């Protein structure tokens, strides 16, 4: 049996490790720990439609394809409670916000290839009928049936446990060079840490703040849908969890080696202001955590999934969509491991440029 070392124990590395083990590889995951792991911070939305942005058609097509593969991965993990919502609402605070949502919906509709997700226009009254705790000021929006959210931390635990049960070994160390590994194959899936192991990756960091709030006995319950709101030109999302809500997320450039990744006061302030405007009852929730993470981004917004040399495959640069793209990435990497001459399939048109 051939061996592979997967460097990185975030959602990308763990998904690859499980898929490689299922494909018959002897797998070990080499991981430096949770401190700089974007997957631990994420909101967990599977936003194939919600992340559809004009100019990013390839990314949208990849996301739609990957989202299609998520139910099988959830079945493989055997923990249905990883899924915290199966539908999303896109809601607008003003007529101008609604106009912007209409524009995005028209784009997504024109590219719509995923029969599993259904997008319908809804009024302010519909919003209140679907989610009674949302503000009466919301003017309208869209319902995306089949656009899921996952509990990212429960997902990481389920991936690790399932991988371990299928024979994957975990090695909790930070490696300084891929030459330090003597496995038959090496997969670099170290998020932003990939820069240090393969400098041509040239990943940039997009910092994001996220809040975790817990329901109290006197609070209204969390919404059943993911709520993605446009409020006065700003975006905020509320993602349900079993015991509360994740509110996110800001996005701005940051140094790649940002040291301790702490949230800025202004980001926390904006998120709380926007989230309580959308759902006033959030004020009685307990603020359990204000966190921040760095999204590993490429210049063209597409992930890098390709073979570097006869022993090394790279899978990184998933930006704001790493959870969405995990199953597709894992399948592509396993294909590359099994057939070193294989080109990326059309389902995974990965980041270009001279590398
Ligand atoms: C605020 C925020 C919200 C987000 N929300 C969403 C969302 O709703 N949906 C979505 O799809 N995506 C979301 N994302 C993006 C998503 O989190 C990332 O794309 C994804 O987590 C990247 O996963 P990864 O495994 O590549 O990297 P990481 O999760 O960063 O994992 C990399 C791992 O590699 C390890 N490592 C690094 N260097 C080394 C080394 N030299 N040796 C050994 N190990 C090493 C690290 O310790 C770490 O564990 C969000 C991101 C942020 C920051």
Image: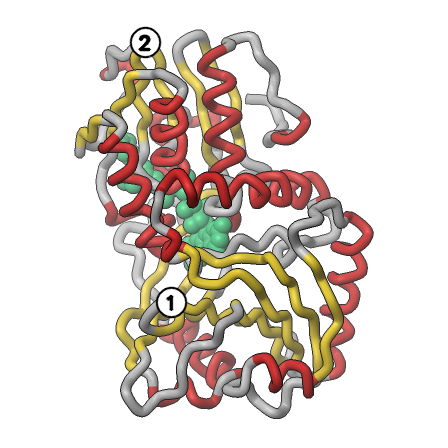
Q: Quadrant of residue 134?
A: bottom right
Q: Look at 75% across and 82% down and name the residue there.
A: 95
Q: Is residue 34 above or below residue 23?
A: below
Q: Is residue 297 above or below residue 246?
A: above
Q: Look at 75% across and 49% down and name the residue there.
A: 112
Q: Secondary structure at mark 1?
A: strand
Question: Could you say where residue 288 lies in the image, as x and y percent from the top left?
Answer: 26, 73
Question: Could you say where residue 109 lies in the image, as x and y percent from the top left?
Answer: 78, 55
* Residue labelled with disc 1: 241
In depth, the one of 285 and 241 nearer the eye is 241
Q: Quadrant of the C terminus?
A: top right
Q: Secondary structure at mark 2?
A: loop
Question: Could you say where residue 214 lies in the image, as x and y percent from the top left?
Answer: 31, 76
Q: As drawn, is 146 to the left or to the right of 110?
A: left
Task: Assess disc 1: are there few (<14), some (14-19) or many (≥20) residues with their C-alpha within 10 Å of its C-alpha.
Answer: many
Question: Could you say where residue 32 lies in the image, as x and y percent from the top left?
Answer: 23, 37
Residue 187's tag is none
Q: Is mark 1 within 8 Å of ligand 1?
A: no
Q: Look at 57% across and 64% down and name the residue there.
A: 87
The mark nearer the N terminus, 2 or 1, is 2
Q: CA distance from mark 2 to mark 1?
A: 40 Å
Point out the residue furthest to the left here: 172
Q: Is residue 172 above or below residue 307?
A: below
The number of discs equals: 2
The answer to whether residue 6 is seen in the rendering is yes
Ligand 1 visible in quadrant: top left
Q: Quadrant of residue 314?
A: top left
* Residue labelled with disc 2: 2
Q: Is mark 2 within 8 Å of ligand 1?
A: no
Q: As drawn, is 216 to the left or to the right of 325?
A: left
């Amino acid at each position: 049996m051939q061996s592979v070392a997967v460097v990185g124990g975030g959602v990308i590395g763990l998904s690859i490790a499980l898929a490689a083990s299922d494909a018959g590889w002897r797998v070990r995951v080499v991981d430096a720990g949770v401190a700089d792991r974007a997957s631990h911070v994420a909101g967990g939305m599977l936003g194939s439609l919600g992340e559809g942005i004009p100019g990013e058609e390839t990314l949208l097509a990849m996301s739609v394809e990957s989202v299609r593969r998520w139910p099988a991965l959830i079945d493989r993990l055997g923990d249905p409670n990883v899924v915290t919502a199966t539908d999303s609402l896109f809601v607008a605070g003003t007529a101008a916000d609604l106009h912007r949502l209409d524009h995005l919906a028209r784009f997504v509709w024109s590219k719509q290839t995923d029969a599993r997700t259904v997008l319908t226009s809804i009024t302010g009254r519909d919003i209140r009928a679907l989610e009674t705790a949302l503000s009466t000021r919301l003017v309208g929006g869209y319902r995306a049936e089949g656009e899921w959210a996952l509990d990212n931390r429960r997902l990481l635990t389920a991936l690790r446990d399932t991988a371990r049960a299928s024979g994957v070994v975990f090695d909790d160390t930070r490696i300084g060079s891929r030459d330090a590994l003597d496995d038959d194959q090496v997969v670099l899936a170290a998020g932003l840490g990939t820069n240090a192991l393969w400098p041509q990756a040239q990943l940039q960091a997009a910092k994001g703040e996220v809040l975790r709030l817990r329901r109290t006995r006197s609070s209204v319950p969390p919404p059943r849908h993911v709520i993605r709101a446009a409020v006065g030109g700003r975006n905020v999302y509320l993602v349900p969890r079993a015991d509360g809500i994740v509110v996110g997320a800001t996005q701005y450039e940051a140094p790649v080696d940002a040291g301790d990744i702490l949230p800025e006061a202004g980001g926390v302030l904006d998120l709380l202001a926007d989230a309580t405007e959308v759902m006033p009852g959030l004020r009685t929730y307990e603020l359990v955590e204000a966190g921040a993470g760095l999204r590993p981004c490429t210049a063209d917004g597409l992930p890098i999934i390709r073979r570097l040399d006869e022993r090394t495959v790279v899978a990184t640069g998933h930006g704001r969509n790493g959870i969405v793209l995990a199953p597709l990435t894992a399948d592509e990497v396993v294909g590359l491991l099994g057939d070193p001459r294989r080109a990326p399939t059309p389902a995974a048109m990965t980041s270009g440029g001279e590398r």
